């Protein structure tokens, strides 16, 4: 048996899928692993586009293959991120059950003598058994976590009388932690953000300069210069870099802005500002906060006011009370997917001044009502909220020895009412006297 035939036989007996592609995504060879699952022999598959044979995953495959050709480095597709790149079935060894194959895939560069990648090799590994064990463990962990959550919910009901004290202690501890974290990461976040903005400007200028040079060379009509330009751009994969660079910088800037927003929320949450206690008009504070939040409110809500006249001033920390108003107003606006109504009401009740913020959004699900003021709990999509706004509001109102009440009917909106004693907290009032 000659060596080539031996290699082919070995490739066909390996429990791996092997597929060789050129730069046009055309199949040069694949082994029996692919043939058995597609019904096409290596000979019939040869010359066909892999992307056309597997259109469902063409975009993902193209991105992986292009990265190998551009960067001259191997790439890897792990089953947890892309479980079923190729729609192959796998037979379970014990039960014989047919199931969709979980796959690890390596994308390996195949170099020619001039060290330029001319083709790549896809190596597909069937990891269905391993994935099944892993997923089974995850399901078991999920069941245990659910049982734990049910036990915790039962315990929470039994300890209802103690929950307010525990909440206060938790807020103090997390506030100290948040202050430390915000202090440590604020400076590096600042200079990274500044550098990224500058880098984006530099990149824009360099790309404009490159485009200018291209125009100049094109206007010369010199075949030598034009050929040199094309060769250099191809070797450096310049078209790919020119398209990808602005996107990379934009994504990085978005990410650092998100971090900056989290740091800002952490600072507010930890009460790093030492606002002075004083008498303040809550309606004026609410009106000032509306101006600050106007950007987020003016296109989304129609505001209705119902403020009682001659309301007494309240002894408080105005900056922090305004922060509570801001959190409630922004939350209400974000809760309404389309334009809605925001009803603001202020009145005196016994020795307290009450302020209500009511929206016409979708309301709050009953199962979320008990967790609204937990730190880091949020019903917003990932990346849209830190879960600190209502926690901060709860902490501030409690520090003022006030109350915050929530009422909601799903589909009809939600209402938050702040009740603050006119004289302020007893400790502050006695200190003034």
Image (cartoon, rainbow, N blue to C red):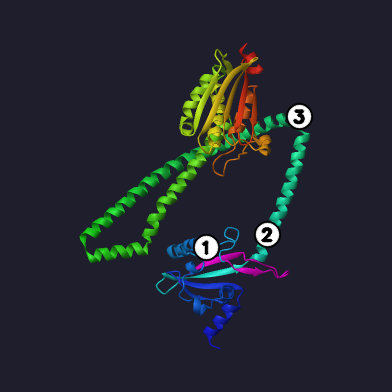
- Closer to the camera: disc 1 or disc 3? 1
Which numbered marker is on residue 161? 3
| Closer to the camera in the image, 75 or 419 | 419
Could one spot residue 273 in this view of the protein? no
Residue 164 lies in quadrant? top right
Tell me how far mark 2 sits from mark 3, CA to CA: 41 Å
| Image x and y of residue 6, in percent | 56, 84
User: Regarding mark 3 in the picture, which secondary structure is present there?
Assistant: helix
**If you read the primary sequence from the N terminus, does the residue marked by circle 2 or circle 1 appear first?**
1
Q: Residues within 10 Å of mark 1 (few under 14, many from 20)?
A: few
Residue 100 among magenta residues: yes
State whether residue 374 is above or below residue 102. above
Q: Residue furthest bottom?
A: 1
Residue 228 among magenta residues: no
**If you read the primary sequence from the N terminus, does the residue marked by circle 1 or circle 3 appear first?**
1
Quadrant of the snapshot with the N terminus = bottom right
**If you read the primary sequence from the N terminus, does the residue marked by circle 2 or circle 3 appear first?**
2
Residue 349 lies in quadrant? top right
Q: Give the extent of the magenta segment.
A: 87-110
| Closer to the camera in the image, 165 or 377 | 377
Residue of label 1: 56
Identity of the residue drawn at 53% across and 78% down: 41
Residue of label 2: 134
Left or right: residue 198 versus residue 85 is: left
Left or right: residue 202 versus residue 38 is: left
């Amino acid at each position: 048996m000659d060596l080539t035939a031996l290699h082919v036989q070995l490739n066909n007996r390996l429990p791996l899928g092997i597929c060789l592609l050129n730069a046009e995504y055309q199949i040069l060879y694949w082994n029996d692993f692919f043939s058995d699952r597609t019904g096409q022999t290596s000979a019939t598959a040869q010359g066909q586009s892999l992307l056309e044979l597997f259109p469902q995953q063409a975009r993902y495959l193209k991105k992986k293959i292009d990265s190998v050709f551009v960067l001259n480095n191997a790439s890897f597709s792990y089953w947890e991120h892309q479980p079923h790149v190729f729609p192959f079935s796998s037979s379970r060894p014990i039960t014989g059950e047919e199931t969709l194959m979980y796959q690890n895939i390596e994308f390996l560069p195949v170099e020619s003598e001039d060290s330029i990648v001319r083709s790549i090799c896809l190596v597909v590994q069937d990891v269905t058994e391993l994935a099944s064990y892993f997923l089974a463990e995850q399901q078991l962990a999920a069941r245990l976590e659910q049982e734990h959550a049910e036990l915790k919910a039962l315990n929470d009901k039994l300890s209802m009388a103690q929950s307010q004290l525990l909440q206060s202690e938790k807020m103090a501890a997390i506030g100290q932690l948040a202050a430390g974290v915000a202090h440590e990461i604020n400076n590096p976040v600042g200079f990274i953000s500044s550098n990224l903005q500058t880098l984006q400007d530099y990149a824009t200028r360099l790309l404009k300069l490159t485009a200018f040079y291209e125009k100049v060379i094109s206007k010369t009509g010199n075949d030598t210069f034009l050929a040199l330009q094309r060769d250099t751009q191809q070797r450096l994969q310049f078209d790919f870099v020119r398209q990808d660079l602005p996107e990379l910088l934009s994504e990085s800037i978005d990410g650092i802005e998100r971090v900056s927003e989290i740091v800002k929320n952490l600072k507010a949450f930890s009460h790093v500002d030492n606002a002075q206690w004083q008498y303040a008009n809550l309606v004026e504070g609410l009106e000032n906060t509306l101006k600050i939040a106007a950007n987020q409110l003016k296109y989304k809500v129609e505001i209705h006011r119902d403020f009682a006249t001659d309301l007494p001033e309240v002894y408080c920390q105005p900056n922090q009370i305004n922060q509570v108003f801001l959190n409630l107003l922004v939350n209400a606006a974000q809760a309404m997917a389309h334009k809605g109504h925001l009803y603001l009401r202020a009145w005196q009740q016994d020795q307290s001044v009450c302020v209500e913020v009511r929206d016409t959004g979708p309301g709050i699900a009953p199962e979320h009502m008990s967790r609204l003021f937990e730190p880091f709990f949020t019903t917003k999509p990932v990346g849209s909220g830190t879960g600190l706004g209502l926690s901060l509001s709860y902490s501030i109102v409690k520090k003022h020895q006030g109350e915050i009440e929530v009422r909601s009917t799903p589909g009809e909106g939600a209402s938050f009412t702040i009740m603050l004693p006119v004289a302020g907290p007893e400790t502050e009032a006695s200190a003034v006297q």
